[in-house]
Amino acid sequence: MKILLVEDEQKLAQALGRGLGLEGYTVDNIADGKKALTRISLHRSDYDIVILDLMLPSMDGYEICKQMREMNITVPILVLTARNETDTKVQLLQSGADDYLVKPFSFSELTARIRALLRRPSEKLPETLAVGDIELNPGERRVRRSGKEIPLTLKEFGLLEYFMRHPNQVVNREDLLNHLWDFNYVGFSNVVDVHVKNLRRKLDSGGSDSVLETVRGIGYRLTQ
Ligand code: CA
């Protein structure tokens, strides 16, 4: 799951980025309002949720919400507000935000809100994803194959979740990079291949048939 964090308080942004990273989310941070709107308009399908501070340089959070909705960008928006900003609730919901959190907030409160928004009925996420004999539970972050638990790293888990949400489709390396690595990542696209190779080895470790095939020159496909 990939988050766009729009926050100009550098220390807070760094702390949130680190914490959410440890929870298995990939986080892109942008400190400027207009830049954030440009990013989301060009890369709308990359993000699963937007966390938006209200007071930002060049364009405030209300305006960003409003313009996103006008562009029919439906990604859930969680707004961060300061305590002294009264009347914000109605205004926020009118501007298209899905939920808000008053600063200072606890990290566990934030992750609970994120999980709730990702479960919204508009894009309802099932409790457990199943493809063939593989089961993945995003909430518990567990994977089983034929009932046997398979321990995965965060990146491997993220890759498998992505494949399981796109079963029988060819997924290219670029999609995987965009979804699972942040935009500051500088490296070789073979980082994807290395993680996929490890994931495949673990999935097949019980002697089961391989379900993750390489589509030469393009990417990968998870087949049932
Ligand atoms: Ca701010």
Image (cartoon, rainbow, N blue to C red):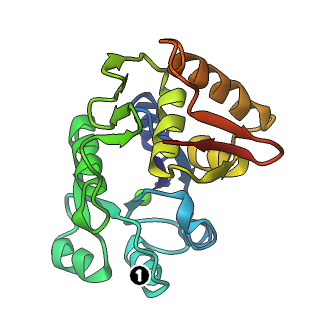
In percent of the image, x 54 and y 42: which residue is there? 223
The vertical placement of 147 against 25, above or below, is above
Q: Residues within 10 Å of mark 1 (few under 14, many from 20)?
A: some
User: Can you give x and y, in whole percent of width and height, for residue 21 in the image?
Assistant: 47, 33
**Is 156 displayed left or right of 181 in the figure?**
left
Which quadrant of the figure has residue 19?
top left
Q: Quadrant of ligand 1?
A: bottom left
Q: What kind of element bears circle 1?
A: helix
Looking at the image, residue 199 sits to the left or right of residue 128; the answer is right
User: What is the number of callouts on the image?
Assistant: 1
Amino acid type of the residue tagged 1 in the rendering = Arg
Above or below residue 207? Residue 211 is: below
Q: Mark 1 points at which residue?
A: 69
Coordinates of residue 105 in the picture (x, y in percent) = 23, 44
Return the residue nearer the eye: 137 or 214: 214
Is residue 29 rendered to the left or right of residue 80? Answer: right
Residue 48 or residue 104, whichever sits in front:
48
In the rendered image, residue 17, in percent from the top left (x then y), is placed at: 47, 39
Q: Is mark 1 within 8 Å of ligand 1?
A: no
Q: Quadrant of residue 214?
A: top right
Which x, y percent locates residue 215?
74, 43
Q: Which residue is drawn at 46% across and 20% down?
A: 152
**Residue at image location 64% in from the left, 71% down from the top:** 42
Q: Which residue is drawn at 40% across and 82% down?
A: 66
Furthest residue toward bottom: 70
